[in-house]
Image (cartoon, rainbow, N blue to C red):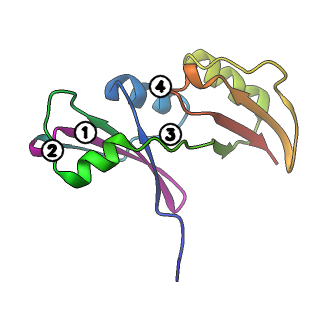
Amino acid sequence: MIKKLRHIGIMVEDFERAVKKFEGFGLPLSEEMEKKEDGMKIGFFPIGDTLIEFLHFSPDKGWDSVHKVVRSQKGALNHLCFEVENLEESIKDFEENGAKLLEGSPMKGAHGRVAFFEPSSTENVLVEICEV
């Protein structure tokens, strides 16, 4: 039986840049670790009972079979949606931290007003914010 979503794993190319950007979006980094033996850095951002996990693998490190599969995963995460208090203020905060609003945003969403940001400006993650 599944109890809850524990975390969402995201591969990032530049760990420090990705952490700084997402902290600028209002997500505090709660834990950071480096597993030198595996050539990886990991960071966690808590949101309620769920964590977003950033993974970065060193390009010059050999991996065991599990890490080879994780590192080579080609499946795509569609988007992350964050609920915000004030859509306009949050858009400004995101833009101040390098995010670029997608053309046509903000707009009416399924459960209130939403805005999407260009994935190229959010570490290749499609980010949606919503005001319910």
The percent coordinates of residue 67 (x first, y second) are: 24, 48
> Which residue is identified by label 4?
21
> In this rendering, which labeled residue sits more in front, label 2 or label 4?
2
Amino acid type of the residue that numbered disc 3 sits on in the rendered structure: Leu
Left or right: residue 101 compared with residue 26: right
> Which residue is identified by label 3?
27
Query: Which callout, 4 or 3, points at the residue further toward the start of the chain?
Result: 4
Left or right: residue 55 compared with residue 65: right
Amino acid type of the residue that numbered disc 2 sits on in the rendered structure: Asp
Decide: marks 2, 4 in contact (CB < 8 A)? Answer: no
Q: For the residues marked 1 and 2, what is the alpha-carbon distance in whole angstroms?
A: 9 Å
- Residue 15 vertical placement versus 76 (above, below): above
Query: Which callout, 2 or 4, points at the residue further toward the start of the chain?
Result: 4
Decide: marks 1, 3 in contact (CB < 8 A)? Answer: no
- Around disc 2, counting alpha carbons within 10 Å, would you say few (fewer than 14), some (14 to 19), or many (20 or more)? some
State the extent of the magenta-drawn residues as a range. 37-53
Query: Which callout, 4 or 1, points at the residue further toward the start of the chain?
Result: 4
Amino acid type of the residue that numbered disc 4 sits on in the rendered structure: Lys
Q: For the residues marked 4 and 3, what is the alpha-carbon distance in whole angstroms?
A: 9 Å
The percent coordinates of residue 4 (x first, y second) are: 54, 70
> In this rendering, which labeled residue sits more in front, label 4 or label 1?
1
> Which residue is identified by label 1?
41
The percent coordinates of residue 73 (x first, y second) are: 40, 44
Numbered circles on residues, count: 4
> Which residue is identified by label 2?
38
